[in-house]
């Protein structure tokens, strides 16, 4: 059955015929070829595919880390394609959280200070940022480790800090680039459950770039990329979190 | 703000050795500039005091207009007679800033030991007033005796001091008698016996075999005149020099006197030359320090940016603006500059204390005995050095920091 356009909810993210080219010497490489994609608020979606398929490039464009060669990117209905650099920084700070494969925590800051960072960039007072960061660290099960620097935390704990940091400013969207790639099986499962739980509790939209089959099984939507194009797209019945109560820091 | 300063401070500890070397380079540069600055301040003050107090030349010297240009060819035309001096003294002594005003008459002629003669030039002074000016000396200048033998006295009219070279040339010992000959102001040859009371070093090498010191009365007797050619004025404070010159010039003009007033530094060519020389040395030292500081900071910040490229990408992804990245590295650089400056202050104080403690001596030009070598602490130099080095550190960091801020975020995040 076809749903009338007016009845469809407004997408959180919309890409319209997006192309992205890279210049490698004399050769122009097409990383994305006319991608059009809509992500609805609250989705838990994975972009997957072989290496070089364009999934990271797509995530970078959605996360306003890069600009398309042509086409437009809309976030909450606003065309963000041509925003000035400062304005893009503000949008990223306010609306988008990032979780990186290598955690990318600032090594000289404690777990708490790392989580406070996005709020302090936004100009939030240190006391309020501290309060909210403590709250987020509690949610990811790291309350006893707030004073530890990243080097003193395990890989799983570091990724939890990164998730807390991604969520501390209450963004509408979290982009996670291979979030489980550097984790062992147990930690990877825990991290997937944690993100699923946060997605359900806060309604935050999650977009993953991943190869991880375990993660692909838990998402609500899979977008398969191949040669810079969307090769397949499927919506799955979203399984509820089952192991949240057993999460260990 | 404090968060970013804290972050910058912690980043400096990430590569302790590199930061330490940069801080050391800045600190040593600071200390070198300030130690040299302190030494030159000591030299300038000593030269100034030596000229004003030690040689009793005062702060201001008053001549008849044109004396300095034409006076050597026709000195008698430019003498200040008793009537002029009465007015000048009245004007000068009306100011409490004037401590002493003493006349001089410079003469020249031949000095003979009875067998051979040689040219001499002499300053005729009032010995008691010269000693009074000497008495206002500060620091080392007042403690150094600039002659051997006895001091000149007002009462011993024919007593004279000879530069050592002149005495050697004429083989004159202390208490010996020589004959001074010179044309009087009316053009007749006059001769007077002079009793050698003291030997001294001439302030300029070229005058070593020509210079004499005589009493004013001796000079006036030899020239057969009651006039003088200049009036030396000692002021309460060096800082009053320019204002008093202007004030006295106005007052002399109002009285119809055509005079010119020179300040001590205009007349002390030796001081001016030494100052110019030290200014050039100081400039070279500063340029070397400038280069070392700039290169060290550029290297430190450049390396930090290379090592932390991924971190820069992360901060940018989290919403840090380009100017935030510049600010972060500028803060790190500023802290390097501050830490280096603080180390520099400590090193300067250690150098200063060491010199105070060890009291090394040296033999400066124009002084015949060793005197303590000193380095002055000059707070204004230190303050300017701190401001300059911190500013230099900031400027040096700005280039690599701007480059870091312009990095593509995706490229920075993918940096290995």
Image (cartoon, coloured by chain):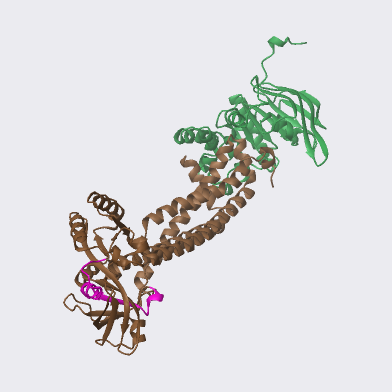
- The image shows residue B411, relative to residue B49, as above or below, that is above
- The image shows residue B220, relative to residue B237, as above or below, that is below
Point out the image quarter for the N terminus of chain A: top right
Q: Colour of chain B?
A: brown
- The image shows residue B15, relative to residue A101, as above or below, that is below
Would residue B371 appear left or right of A117 to someone viewing this image?
left
Would residue A225 appear left or right of A218 to someone viewing this image?
right
Extreme residue in the bottom direction: B115
Q: Quadrant of residue B166?
A: bottom left
> Percent x, y for residue B390?
48, 50
On whether residue B205 falls in the magenta region, the answer is yes
On whether residue B398 falls in the magenta region, the answer is no
Q: Is residue B376 visible?
A: no
Q: Which residues are magenta?
A: B204-228
Would residue B78 appear left or right of A158 to someone viewing this image?
left
> Percent x, y for residue B320?
57, 36
> Percent x, y for residue A212?
74, 36
Q: Which chain is green?
A: A
């Amino acid at each position: 059955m076809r749903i009338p356009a007016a009845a469809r909810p407004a997408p959180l993210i919309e890409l319209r015929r997006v192309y992205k080219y890279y210049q490698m010497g004399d050769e122009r490489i097409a990383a994305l070829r006319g991608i059009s994609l809509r992500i609805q608020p609250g989705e838990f979606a994975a972009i997957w595919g072989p290496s070089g398929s364009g999934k990271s490039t797509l995530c970078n464009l959605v996360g306003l880390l890069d600009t398309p060669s042509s086409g437009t990117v809309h976030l909450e209905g606003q065309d963000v394609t041509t925003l000035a650099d400062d304005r893009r920084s503000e949008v990223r700070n306010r609306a988008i959280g990032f979780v990186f494969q290598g955690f990318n925590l600032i090594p000289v800051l404690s777990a708490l200070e790392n989580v406070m960072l996005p709020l302090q960039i936004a100009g939030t007072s240190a006391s309020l940022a501290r309060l909210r960061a403590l709250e987020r660290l509690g949610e990811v099960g790291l309350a006893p480790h707030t004073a530890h620097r990243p080097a003193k935390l395990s890989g799983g704990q570091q990724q939890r800090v990164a998730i807390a940091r991604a969520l501390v400013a209450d963004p509408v969207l979290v982009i996670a680039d291979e979030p489980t790639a550097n984790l062992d099986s147990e930690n990877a499962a825990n991290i997937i459950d944690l993100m699923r739980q946060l997605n359900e509790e806060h309604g935050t939209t999650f977009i993953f770039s991943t190869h991880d089959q375990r993660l692909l099984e838990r998402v609500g939507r899979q977008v398969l990329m191949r040669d810079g194009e969307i090769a397949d797209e499927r919506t799955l019945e979203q399984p509820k979190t089952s192991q949240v109560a057993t999460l260990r820091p | 703000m404090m968060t970013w300063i804290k972050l910058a401070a912690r980043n400096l500890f990430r590569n302790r050795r590199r930061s330490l070397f940069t801080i050391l380079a800045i600190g040593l540069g600071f200390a070198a500039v300030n130690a040299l600055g302190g030494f030159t301040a000591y030299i300038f003050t000593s030269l100034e005091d030596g000229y004003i107090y030690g040689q009793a030349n005062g702060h201001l010297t008053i001549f008849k207009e044109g004396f300095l240009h034409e006076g050597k060819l026709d000195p008698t035309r430019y003498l200040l007679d008793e009537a002029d001096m009465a007015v000048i003294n009245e004007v000068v002594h009306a100011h409490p800033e004037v401590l002493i005003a003493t006349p001089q008459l410079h003469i020249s002629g031949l000095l003979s030991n009875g067998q051979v003669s040689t040219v001499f030039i002499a300053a005729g002074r009032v010995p008691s007033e010269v000693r009074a000016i000497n008495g206002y000396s500060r620091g080392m200048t007042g403690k150094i005796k600039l002659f051997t033998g006895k001091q000149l006295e007002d009462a011993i009219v024919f007593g004279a001091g000879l530069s050592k070279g002149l005495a050697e040339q004429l083989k004159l010992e202390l208490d010996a008698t020589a004959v001074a000959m010179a044309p009087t102001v009316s053009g007749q040859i006059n001769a007077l016996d002079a009793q050698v009371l003291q030997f001294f070093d001439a302030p300029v090498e070229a005058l070593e075999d020509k210079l004499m010191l005589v009493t004013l009365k001796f000079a006036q007797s030899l020239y057969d005149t009651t006039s003088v050619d200049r009036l030396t004025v000692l002021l309460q404070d060096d800082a009053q020099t320019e204002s008093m010159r202007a004030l006295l010039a106005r007052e002399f003009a109002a009285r119809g006197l055509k005079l010119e007033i020179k300040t001590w530094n205009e007349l002390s060519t030796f001081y001016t030359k030494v100052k110019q020389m030290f200014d050039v040395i100081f400039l070279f030292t500063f340029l070397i320090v400038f280069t070392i500081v700039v290169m060290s900071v550029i290297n430190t910040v450049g390396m930090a940016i290379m090592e932390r490229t991924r971190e820069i990408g992360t901060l940018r992804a989290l919403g840090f603006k380009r100017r935030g990245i510049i600010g972060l590295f500028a803060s790190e650089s500023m802290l390097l500059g501050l830490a280096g400056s603080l180390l520099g202050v400590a090193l300067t104080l250690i150098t200063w204390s060491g010199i105070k403690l060890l009291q090394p001596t040296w033999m400066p030009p124009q002084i015949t005995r060793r005197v303590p070598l000193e380095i002055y602490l000059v707070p204004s130099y230190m303050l300017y050095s701190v401001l300059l080095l911190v500013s230099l550190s900031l400027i040096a960091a700005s280039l690599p920091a701007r480059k870091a801020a312009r990095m593509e975020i995706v490229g920075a995040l993918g940096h290995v």
